Image (cartoon, grey):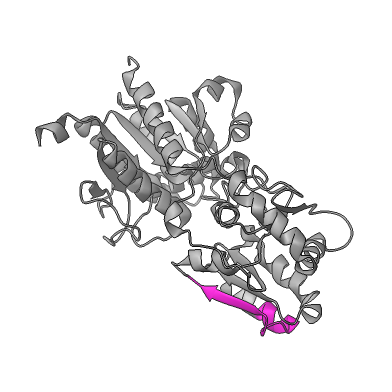
C-alpha cells in the first residue's frame, strides 16, 4: 500500500465512458491499464448520467470516478434564466448554453484537481479537453490534451462535437493551458499555431497482437470493411461502387462490420440497388481476427481518420487495403502499389470500383500487396506506445512548475 501511495498519480479524463464501445473509449481503458501496469496510480474520471460500467475491461487497480451530479452550479442556474429572456443577444445565449452544459463537469474537475493534486491529467478528445484545460488553469495541475482525429476537423468543423460557436472557440483557446498536446502523427501537429508547436507530441496508436490469427492459405473471396456506420466512414460509397461490380463477380461478397446511425440508410440503399445477397451488414463482432484472416481485400473508403486502426489491423494480417489517397490518418501507412491501392477521390469514373475490380481480377497482385502489409505497420507496437507515453509523463512531471 505504501508503494501504491508513493506512485505518481495520473488522472485520465473523458466525457462519457459507460457502456460505450468506440475506439476512443477503448484507447482510454487500455491506456489506464497500461499506465497501471507501468507502476502509476491511475484514476479514471468521467461524466455519465448513469453509472454504467465501461464496455472495455479496466484493471481493478484503477480508480473509477463518475463526476456527474444532478445539482446545478450558480453559473448553470444563471445560464438557465438567461436563456428564457426574450431579448438577449445570440452571443450571450450561446455562452449560456455552454455554461449550462459544461459548468458542473468543469467545477467538479476543478475541485478534484485541487483536492487530489494528480501529477498529470490526460484528457481524451475535445469534449473533455476543453473542460479539463479550463479546470486545470485555476490549479497547478498539468494537462495533456489528446487528439484522436484530424485536428482541423476536431477544432474547426461545425459538424463535429458541439456545434455551439462558443464551444469551437473555447476548444482552441483552452489549448494555451496545455502542458502537452498529443496527436497521432507528426504531420497533424502542423495544424496548431506556432506558439503551441513545441508542446505537440505525436504518439500513434498501436495494433494489438492479441487478435491476430494465422491467415488462411487460400483467402475467401471477401471484401471486408470494419468501422462505425457513420457518414465519415463513407460506406454508402462502398455499397454504390459494389453495385457496379456485383454482377461481374457473383462469387464475391462485401461484409461490413460495425454499428452506428447510418445502419437503416445503408440497409435501404442495399435494397434499392439490389445487392442484398452479396452485401452483408454484420453488426458488432469481437473476434475480428477470424475475419481478417480469411478476407482477400479490405476496403476503407473513409473521408478522414485519426489513425485508421481497422485498415492497420488488416495490413498486419496481410490483407491489401483499398482507400482514398486523401484520407488523412490512413494515407500515413497505406501506400499505393506497395500494400494497397490508394485512389483519387475526385475525377471522372468510380475510382473505388476500379481499384476493387483490379484486385478481384488479379490474385497475384493481391498476394504481393498483402505480403508487404505486416512490415508497413510494424512500428505501431504496444511496447513503443507504452514507452512513448511513459517518456512524456516522466518528462512533464519532472519539470519544475
Place of residue 152 in the rendered image (x, y in percent of width and height, measured from the top left): 62, 40
77 vs 60, nearest the viewer: 60
The image shows residue 293, relative to residue 376, as above or below, that is below
| Left or right of residue 92, residue 262 in this image | right
Place of residue 130 in the rendered image (x, y in percent of width and height, measured from the top left): 44, 38
Residue 147 inside the magenta-drawn segment: no
Q: Which quadrant is home to the C terminus?
A: top left
Which residue reaches farthest front? 217
The image shows residue 144, relative to residue 333, as above or below, that is above
84 vs 238, nearest the viewer: 238
**Image quadrant assignment for residue 348:** bottom right
Which residue is pictured at 35% across the width and 58% down the height?
56
Place of residue 167 in the rendered image (x, y in percent of width and height, measured from the top left): 50, 42
| Left or right of residue 310, residue 359 in this image | right
**Range drawn in magenta:** 268-284
| Left or right of residue 300, residue 348 in this image | right
Residue 75 in view (yes/no): no
Q: Which quadrant is home to the N terminus?
A: top left
Which residue is pictured at 48% across the width and 31% down the height?
181
**Image quadrant assignment for residue 237:** bottom right
Place of residue 271 in the rendered image (x, y in percent of width and height, measured from the top left): 68, 83
The image shows residue 69, relative to residue 283, as above or below, that is above
Amino acid at each position: 500500500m505504501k508503494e501504491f501511495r508513493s506512485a505518481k498519480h495520473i488522472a485520465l479524463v473523458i466525457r462519457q465512458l459507460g457502456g460505450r464501445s468506440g475506439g476512443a473509449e477503448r484507447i482510454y481503458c487500455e491506456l489506464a491499464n497500461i499506465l497501471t501496469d507501468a507502476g502509476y496510480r491511475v484514476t479514471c474520471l468521467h461524466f455519465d448520467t448513469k453509472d454504467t460500467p465501461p464496455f472495455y475491461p479496466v484493471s481493478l487497480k484503477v480508480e473509477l470516478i463518475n463526476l456527474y451530479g444532478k445539482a446545478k452550479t450558480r453559473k448553470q442556474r444563471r445560464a438557465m434564466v438567461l436563456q428564457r429572456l426574450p431579448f438577449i443577444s445570440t452571443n450571450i445565449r450561446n455562452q449560456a448554453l455552454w455554461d449550462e452544459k459544461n459548468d458542473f463537469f468543469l467545477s467538479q474537475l476543478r475541485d478534484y484537481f485541487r483536492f487530489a493534486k494528480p501529477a498529470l491529467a490526460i484528457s481524451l478528445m475535445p469534449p473533455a479537453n476543453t473542460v479539463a484545460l479550463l479546470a486545470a488553469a485555476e490549479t497547478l495541475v498539468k494537462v495533456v490534451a489528446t487528439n484522436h482525429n484530424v485536428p482541423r476537423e476536431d477544432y474547426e468543423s461545425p459538424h463535429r462535437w458541439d456545434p455551439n460557436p462558443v464551444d469551437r472557440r473555447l476548444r482552441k483557446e483552452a489549448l494555451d493551458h496545455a502542458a502537452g498536446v498529443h496527436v497521432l502523427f507528426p504531420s497533424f501537429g502542423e495544424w496548431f499555431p506556432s506558439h503551441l508547436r513545441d508542446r505537440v507530441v505525436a504518439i500513434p496508436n498501436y495494433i494489438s497482437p492479441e487478435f491476430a490469427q494465422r491467415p488462411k492459405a487460400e483467402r475467401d473471396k471477401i471484401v471486408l470493411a470494419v468501422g462505425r456506420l457513420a457518414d465519415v466512414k463513407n460506406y454508402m460509397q462502398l455499397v454504390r461502387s459494389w453495385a457496379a461490380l456485383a454482377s461481374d463477380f457473383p462469387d464475391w461478397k462485401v461484409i461490413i462490420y460495425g454499428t452506428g446511425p447510418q445502419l437503416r440508410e445503408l440497409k435501404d440503399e442495399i435494397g434499392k440497388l439490389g445487392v442484398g445477397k452479396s452485401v452483408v451488414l454484420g453488426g458488432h463482432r469481437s473476434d475480428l481476427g477470424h475475419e481478417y484472416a480469411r478476407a482477400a481485400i479490405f476496403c476503407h473508403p473513409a473521408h478522414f481518420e485519426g489513425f485508421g486502426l481497422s485498415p492497420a489491423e488488416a495490413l498486419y494480417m496481410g490483407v491489401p487495403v483499398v482507400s482514398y489517397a486523401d484520407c488523412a490518418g490512413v494515407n500515413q501507412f497505406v501506400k499505393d502499389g506497395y500494400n494497397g491501392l490508394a485512389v483519387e477521390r475526385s475525377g471522372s469514373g468510380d475510382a473505388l470500383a476500379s481499384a476493387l475490380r483490379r484486385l478481384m481480377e488479379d490474385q497475384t497482385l493481391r498476394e504481393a500487396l498483402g505480403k508487404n502489409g505486416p512490415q508497413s505497420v510494424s512500428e505501431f507496437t504496444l511496447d513503443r506506445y507504452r514507452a512513448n507515453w511513459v517518456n512524456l509523463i516522466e518528462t512533464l512531471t519532472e519539470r519544475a512548475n
